[in-house]
Image: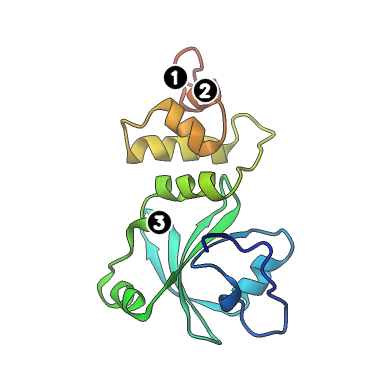
């Protein structure tokens, strides 16, 4: 089953949470403590590094399950975890061959849009929104304002404002 782990019966002090998580799990940051319980036994093995700051590989210290993790704290405040088999984990460790699922920030945000809900920003030009819109445009220059708006869970007008398009120019330029 794909999706959220919010209702998983993972309890503190009962070993690891790996068996309660789906193969593709969404763990909300700071909600009911599930993130603390899940990550209590996950040890970071390898960061992707470079421009892929959100992506890393972890392994459970109890059951030895490997997880590819995308940590998305700008828009959705979620961890996206993909269960990996031993061969997939070894390909990452030995050859830096990461599965494509979380390899771009746009893919991570699409997953967030499908499986979660975006954070609501009080500040219209929040650095998290501005930086993410600019990162998406830099990674894929042909991305449309509408696509950016959808990924961020905002209106196209707001996305255009973040990018300084049309009459929405940056006030500090």
Q: Position of residue 130 (x, y in %)?
A: 51, 34
**Distance of label 3 from label 2 (alpha carbons):** 27 Å
Q: Local crowd at mark 3 within 10 Å, few (<14), some, or many (≥20)?
A: many
Residue occupied by mark 1: 165
Residue occupied by mark 3: 102
Image point 48% across, 49% down: which residue? Answer: 111
Give the residue furthest to the front: 1
Nearer-N-terminus badge (3/2): 3
The kind of secondary structure element at disc 1 is loop
Disc 3 vs disc 2: which is toward the camera? 3
Residue 92, quarter of picture = bottom left
**Distance of label 1 from label 3 (alpha carbons):** 28 Å
Q: Local crowd at mark 1 within 10 Å, few (<14), some, or many (≥20)?
A: few
Q: Residue 161, which numbered label?
A: 2
The kind of secondary structure element at disc 3 is helix
Report the number of numbered marks. Answer: 3
**Distance of label 1 from label 2 (alpha carbons):** 6 Å
Q: Marks 2 and 1: in contact by CB < 8 Å? A: yes
Q: Marks 2 and 3: in contact by CB < 8 Å? A: no
The kind of secondary structure element at disc 2 is helix
Q: Residue 96, which numbered label?
A: none
In front: 79, or 46?
79
Image point 56% across, 41% down: which residue? Answer: 128
Is residue 35 shown above or below 52?
Answer: below
- Name the side, left or right, on which 130 lies relative to 32: left
Is residue 70 shown above or below 149?
Answer: below
Residue 155, quarter of picture = top right
């Amino acid at each position: 089953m794909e999706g959220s782990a919010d209702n998983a019966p993972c309890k503190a002090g009962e070993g690891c949470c790996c068996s309660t998580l789906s193969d593709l799990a969404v763990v909300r940051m700071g909600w009911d403590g599930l993130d603390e319980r899940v990550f209590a036994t996950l040890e970071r093995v390898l960061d992707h590094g470079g421009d892929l700051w959100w992506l890393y590989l972890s392994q459970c210290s109890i059951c030895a399950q490997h997880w590819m993790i995308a940590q998305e704290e700008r828009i959705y405040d979620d961890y996206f975890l993909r269960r990996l088999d031993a061969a997939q984990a070894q390909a990452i460790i030995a050859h830096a061959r990461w599965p494509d699922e979380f390899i771009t920030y746009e893919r991570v945000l699409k997953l967030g849009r499908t499986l979660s809900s975006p954070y609501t920003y009080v500040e219209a030009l929040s650095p998290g929104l501005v930086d993410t819109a600019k990162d998406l445009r830099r990674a894929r220059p042909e991305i449309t304002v509408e696509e950016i708006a959808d990924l961020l869970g905002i209106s196209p007008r707001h996305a255009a404002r973040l990018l300084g398009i049309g009459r929405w120019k940056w006030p500090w330029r």
